[in-house]
Image (cartoon, rainbow, N blue to C red):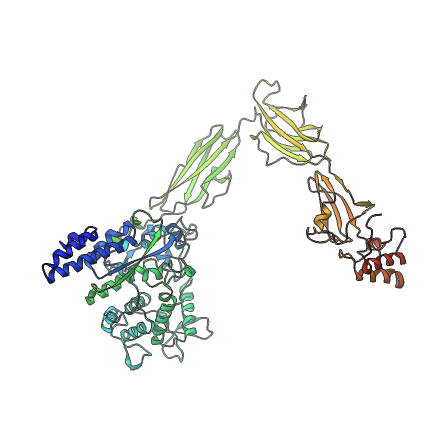
Amino acid sequence: MLKMFRKRRINIATVIVAVISMLAVGAYGIKQTIDVVADVKFDESLKQFPESYRDSLRALHDEHPKWTFEAVNTGLDWNTVLANESKIRRKLVPASGHSMSLGLMDNSRWYQTPTAWKAYDEIDGAFNYDKNEWVVFDTGQWNQASPAAISYVMDPRNWLTEEYMFMFEQLSYNASHDTVTVINNTLKGTFMYNAKCPGASGNKTYAQVIVDAAKAAKVSAIHLAVRLIQEKGTSNDELGKGVITTDGKNFTQATGKEKTIYYNFFNIGAAGSGKQTVINNGGKEAMSEGWTSPYLAIMGGAVKVNNGYIAIGQDTIYFEMFSVVNKAYYYWKQYAQNLTASLTEGCKIYTTYKNSGITDSAFVFRIPVYNNMPEQACPNPGWYTNGDDASLRANPNTRLKSLTVNGGKLALTPTLDYKETSYNLTVPYSTETVTIAAQAIAGTSTVSGTGKKSLEVGTNEYKIVCKSEYGTTRTYKLNITREKSPEKSTYLTALKPTSGSLSGTFKKATGKYKMTVNNSISSIGFTYTMESSESLVELRYGKHTISCSDGKIAAQSLTVGVNTFYIDVYDSADKSGEKTTYQVDITRNAATTFDNKKLQINGSYINGFTIGEKVSNAIKAVSVTNGSVKILDSDKKVKSESSMVATGDYFTVYDADGKVMKQYQIVLYGDVNGDGKVDLFDYMYLKKHHWVKPILTGIKLEAANIYSKSSGVDLFDMAVMKKFLWKNGTITQTR
């Protein structure tokens, strides 16, 4: 009856009836009632999970009623997370294989990493096509994981089983689980089992030190033990045996006799490309933290694990590997690059708990949920269960090393590229056949679609297929265009105007072109090249038809606006055959004119501006047709519209093509020094020029001639400026 209750949803009324009926049968009935209520509570808690999670969680609940499942709604889009986790070097898989597999398989065997678990085309930088091999990272033992493998491991629904659940366990210290006996059993088969930990007082074993570290850092001791096994293996590594340095940058293996030896048991900071780089980075971390013994490395590393992960929300093995719970650290903050580390660590913890007989304890599992997840759990792309099947590890390279036509004598467009699959080639009419050859980069790949090919006039499409050893294919398209017979052709191979240029590159099969010329261009002609010497070329312009010869079309007058030219090319002089018409629309711009309104032009000078006037207002002082006006500074650089007009600036008129039509130098009377203002500095220039010695020339001398009725700089000019400065006088800007 209990099982029946667990297999379906139970409403409150049912519970009440059950309680009443079971109370009548004593203590046994009470226990059953408690179980029923617990089931109802569990069913309610299950609502926080998507439907695709629930069957697995119900099965786990049936076996382990004390387990608690918490849904962690990340709020993140599944595809966004997958895209970020699939960035180069973020998630890696073993280059050759590993014995741990997914944590539960035969550890005595070495399972080769299948092709489907390694990235190829999906991620740039994952595969070196020239060398025909996957790019290796870090210590040279790792390749980029494929998006399919990442999605499989990242999907929580694949791991809602007793064996794998502990990657979701909340990693808090638990005195009932984290005992020295349990931890020592976890270390069995490693160098740490029943061994004294160097640097620890009282001859403490590694197990005792791990428990002490867990208690101090408030982290699961079993998690620390498994993490140490993951990082150090069974026989320890360089950073665990100790390293030394002479320069603080480069680290080498210690002999054990050196004065200062550094240890890094959790391999914190030990990352990079190449084994030595990994050791150097891990050594620097150990030196900066003062980890001069295995004891200090374990105690300090545990604190780092807590502070760096547990304390900021990454409080499960899964979240340590997939950073999706703390916005500040999304995607990049991961404890390890090894894609399956969460699986192997979780399985190791499960094994420890099982051997210790505590799997039925009250564990809390924090399980992530993403937005827009696939309806079904992501499939396994192909795993190690058939690790001896060579086909699973076949080379997937479908790239070509070479693709040639007629032994490379005919050049393809574009040149052969790893990412390009479409190529073009144009051959003359005389080319009736071609020989296509291709070679795959990988010797294990096969190529089809090559050989001798007959060509029809026009475009001929050929498909060259490269099939990899793995079975994947890549199709290359080769479009070979055979030209029409030059003996009878209606094409021009070149057409150029005598002024300006056509829009776009001339192509013989393209019939329409446009161009725009300045108003100064009043007539235009063309030069051309015929594909066949037998062709006849005529020009139609307006009501006239003009015969053309010697590759030249005589210049024709242009009107303002659009002028349409039709160039007819006949395949024979008698016009009895085919014809191709090229249309060229030539727009002649109207003349550039401008009305200076309030401004005055005096030779090369222009005046009439207001003192302190902004460039934007000055430009509005003229009306320009088919052109534009800009004000340049004395160095002939365009001034900003918010700046002030100043003596020495250039008032510049441009035509529609952006060519300078007219240019005048601005005179702002009173602005002697050319800063756009009239102030005491300008007055001092006047006084010095008049009373001491002449210092003003050119445009500045003109700006000093403030009093229009006098010539040169005299007392009248100084009087006008003095009145302007102290008695609210005015300086007339026009003459």
Q: Is residue 117 visible?
A: no
Relative to 434, is 194 on the left or the right? left
Displayed quadrant of residue 548 = top right
Displayed quadrant of residue 164 = bottom left
**Horizontal and vertical percent position of residue 261:** 39, 76
Relative to 70, is 23 on the left or the right? left
Residue 307 versus residue 86: which sits nearer the camera? 307
Relative to 606, is 534 on the left or the right? left
Q: Is residue 499 above or below residue 730?
A: above
Q: Is residue 476 visible?
A: yes
Residue 634 versus residue 249: which sits nearer the camera? 634
Q: Is residue 247 above or below residue 94?
A: below
Residue 14 versus residue 687: which sits nearer the camera? 14
- Labels in figure, total: 0
Q: Is residue 252 above or below residue 628?
A: below
**Horizontal and vertical percent position of residue 67:** 23, 61
Q: Residue at x 90, y 52 (%)?
A: 711
Displayed quadrant of residue 145 = bottom left
Q: Residue at x 40, y 72 (%)?
A: 286
Residue positioned most to the bottom:
202
**Horizontal and vertical percent position of residue 162:** 23, 58
Residue positioned most to the left:
25
Q: Residue at x 90, y 58 (%)?
A: 715
**Horizontal and vertical percent position of residue 612:** 74, 54
Q: Is residue 379 above or below residue 410?
A: below
